[in-house]
Each structure stands twice: as C-alpha cells, then as structure tokens.
Amino acid sequence: MPPRPVELNVNGRAYTLQLEPRVTLLDALREYAGLMGTKKGCDRGQCGACTVIANGRRINSCLTLAVMHEGETITTVEGLASNGALSPLQRAFIEHDAFQCGYCTPGQLCSATALLQEFRNGTASVVTADVRQRPAKLSDEEIRERMSGNICRCGAYSNIVAAIRAAHEGSGQNAGTAGADHRDHRDNRDNA
C-alpha cells in the first residue's frame, strides 16, 4: 500500500507523517519524526527499550503500528522534561545512578512514569496483596513486578528501584525533605 498521511500527537506537538500502513510506531518516531530517544532493542517486544506512553498507558512501540495511534497522546522520553527542567523521576535516575550504558534508560523512564501514575490511580499488580483494594504502598516488590517488562542488560536494577521509590516518595507531602535526603546521600558519597 502506498504511504498516506498519519497524524500523531507526540510530546504535545502535532506531526503529519507520510507512512505506509505497516510502519511501526517505533520506526515512525525514530525514522520519520526524528525523535531518537526511543530505542530499538529487540524489535520483538521483549526488552522494553522502545516503551512509550500512549494515552497514559505504556506500550512497546515496536509491536504496534503508527496508524493505530492517530488521535492519541503519545509521550516519549523527550516529552518527560518540562520547560527545560528534568522530571523528578529523571532527576532521581541521575541521583541514584540508575543507568550504566543508558540504552534502556528511555524505556525505563517512560515505563516508570506510567508506573507511578498507575499506582496513583490505584491499579493493582500481580504482587498486590488484595487486588480488590488500592495497593497500600509502593514497595520494592511492587516496583520490580511493575517494571518487569523492561530489561537492563547492565544490571542496574537495584538503582532503578531506588530511583523510582525516591521519585514516588518525593511526589508526596514530603517532597522537600525527600530531595534534601537525596542530596545529602549524594554529597556523602562524593566525600567518601
């Protein structure tokens, strides 16, 4: 089939791309829209490097066609920062050294952003004690389960969990003290 115009709303910007119907959302973002943050890892939906957020839901962009997302709001890693300032989660990833080579980091960040929203909405996971009730707290076990679709070949998992926990704790009423605690931890590590 010949290319046709496909309108995508990515990171608050409208894109009209000439795409064949078989073009994946991942390829549309990278090759046609020029948004190189989303990574092509396995191209089979197994690694999570291509995770983006579509209408508030995290998806593997390598497993879906771009034409299926017309009219949806898509957020990539480039859209997580606001007015040039990193999101609290992005800052937490830096403060907790939650990446090594960085290849999986865009997918990890998009997945974790959606994870925090899912938890705020009361969405249960497989490890939630009672799926009929809002999860009581975002434990490390909850974070690990909810992030299980994102692979880090470098093995930065404990730091990723710590960063997500810190961003979650910092988003509550103790946001000021949570940020101070992380700065103190970083300063102590630098002085060691």
Image (tube, grey):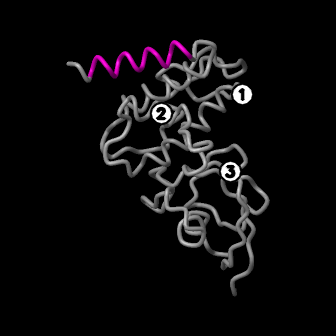
**Tag 3: residue type?**
Ala
Residue tagged by mark 2?
91
Binning the other alpha carbons within 10 Å of mark 1 as few (below 14), some (14 to 19) or many (20 upward) gives: few
Determine if the magenta segment contains residue 177: yes
In the image, which residues are magenta? 176-189
- In the rendered image, residue 82, in percent from the top left (x then y), is placed at 62, 42
Binning the other alpha carbons within 10 Å of mark 3 as few (below 14), some (14 to 19) or many (20 upward) gives: some
Q: Counting residues from the N terminus, which is met first, the one under dot 1 or under dot 2?
A: 2
Q: Would you say the magenta stretch is mainly helix, strand or loop?
A: helix
Q: CA–CA distance between discs 3 and 2?
A: 23 Å
Residue at x 40% of width, y 29% of height: 95
Single out the mark in the foreground, 1 or 2: 2
Residue 170 drawn above or below residue 79: above
Q: Residue furthest right?
A: 71
**Tag 1: residue type?**
Asn
The reply to whether dot 3 and dot 2 touch (C-beta < 8 Å) is: no
Residue tagged by mark 3?
54
Tag 1, which secondary structure? loop
Residue 101 drawn above or below residue 69: above
Residue at x 51% of width, y 56% of height: 38
Q: Counting residues from the N terminus, which is met first, the one under dot 3 or under dot 2?
A: 3
The reply to whether dot 1 and dot 3 touch (C-beta < 8 Å) is: no
Residue tagged by mark 1?
121
Quadrant of the drawing holding the C terminus: top left
